[in-house]
Image: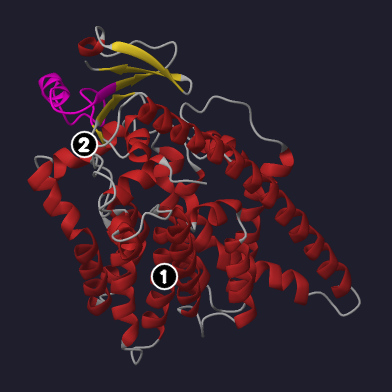
Amino acid sequence: MGLGWDEVVYVSQVTAHRPAAFFSAPRARGVSLLVAPVATWSSSTALLRVHLAVLSGLGLFLALRAWRGLFPPRVLALAGALFATLWVTLFYGPQAMPNYWVAVGALAAVGLFLRARAGRLDRAAPWGVAASVALMAWMRPTDAVWTAAPLLIWAVCVRRWRLSAALGAGLAAGAGQWVVEAYTGFGGLGARLAEAADIQGGLGWNIAVLDQLRSLDGQALCRPCDGPLPSTAVVLWWFVLPLLAALGLVVAVRAGRAAGTLLPLVCAATAGVPYLFMIGYAAPRFLLPVYALLAIPVADGLVHLITAPGRAVRPVTATLVALGLAGHLAVQYAVLERAVARTTAAHRDWARTAAELHRIGVRPPCLLTGEEAIPVAFYAGCSSANVTGHNANITRAGVERAARRMPVAALAAPDGRPPPYARTWRPRPVAGMYAFVAP
């Protein structure tokens, strides 16, 4: 499938085979460290995918183990199967992206928090809470704050200072580097948060529920998100999910173990707030932590549907649930196939553009700027830079100086215009784009 735009940025920070791409304000360094054991010495995308696939499976297994003793093993196994077979999980698990790891960290953190709350003798649980929260903050600090906020509020309100300290230490350990980098590279924490919000189109009251629905048909990014809604078969599971979670809560209340279900539901709600009500676009990976936290209550509700009815009715309910899950799985894999095909085609376009650039003489060491400069530069082995936009990291004079010592090209869409400084440069068609090559 090749590496995507965001993956290129994260991998380029640690690989010796490509120049590092511009690292914008919202990004954190966790993914770069995650891929470093492979990316520092190998340029193989296949090897990197295998590395991440193995780690993602191990991460989910360990996160589910954190819940042992709180729910029966069959509930945990079903929860893992439900989360692992979502198309968005399968699509992003082997990718160098942060959202899956926020989901795994959230699942582990809530389970270990409940274990620490239930028994003071479980001395390892607070350490696990700190490590899990650190993993979330390591990947996406703001997501970690939204997800861990209910845990921290509860711990402070009931004066469980050890748990409060574990949560605070986890957030500090995971986000510490990001905060320090805010002061060294972005003018302070407030400035970095403001720049990150600006890149996301500004944060404020904006209902993005329909945007998320539109992205469920396999779109990696829905921006602007103004297309038609997917078919009922594609979005049905999204509406069934909260109903089954509510059933799981009812089952838990009747069984006298409401906290074990209510807490992940509350954390799922807070994790989803910024992506459902505060941004003007959508990407299905944003809600991976929500799906992971809902998986256990949903699995508990499904197990209840299968086991609660009388012996005469039980085969009927079990068959209906099995048919429903089979249909759900078929839809997920159909969407996954479309998502992979669409993404692979886009990444092949970048590879073709890079090959055409090499053909016309733009070879490493080189510099690309303009349209899709970051991913194309990675594929071509060039550095990337932009004078304007969210990824601006060079001046016009800097581009002109670079053009005196290396091949430089400004990329533009067929119907687009080159940057002002490149209007006198020679235009060359490259794989559906134009490259304005500096003399």
Residue located beneath label 2 in the image? 194
User: Where residue 282 sits: x, y (%)?
Assistant: 47, 37
Colouring style: secondary structure
**Considering only vertical position in the picture, is 261 above or below 200?**
below
Crowd rating for badge 1 (residues with CA inside 10 Å; few <14, some 14–19, many 20+)? many
Residue located beneath label 1 in the image? 110
Name the kind of residue labelled 1 in the image. Answer: Val
Q: Are marks 1 and 2 in contact (CB under 8 Å)?
A: no
Name the kind of residue labelled 2 in the image. Answer: Ala
Instruction: Report the magenta stretch's main SS.
Output: loop
Q: Nearer the viewer, residue 97 or 229?
A: 97
Q: Nearer the viewer, residue 214 or 390?
A: 390
Q: CA distance from mark 1 to mark 2?
A: 29 Å
Q: Is residue 386 part of the magenta span, yes or no?
A: yes
Q: Residue at x 61, y 75 (%)?
A: 77
User: Where residue 351 sits: x, y (%)?
Assistant: 45, 36
| Residue at the limit of the structure toward the right, as seen here | 312
Q: Is residue 372 left or right of residue 383?
A: right
Q: Earlier in the sequence, mark 1 or mark 2?
A: 1
Q: Nearer the viewer, residue 28 or 171?
A: 28
Q: Which quarter of the rendered picture does the C terminus lie within? A: top left
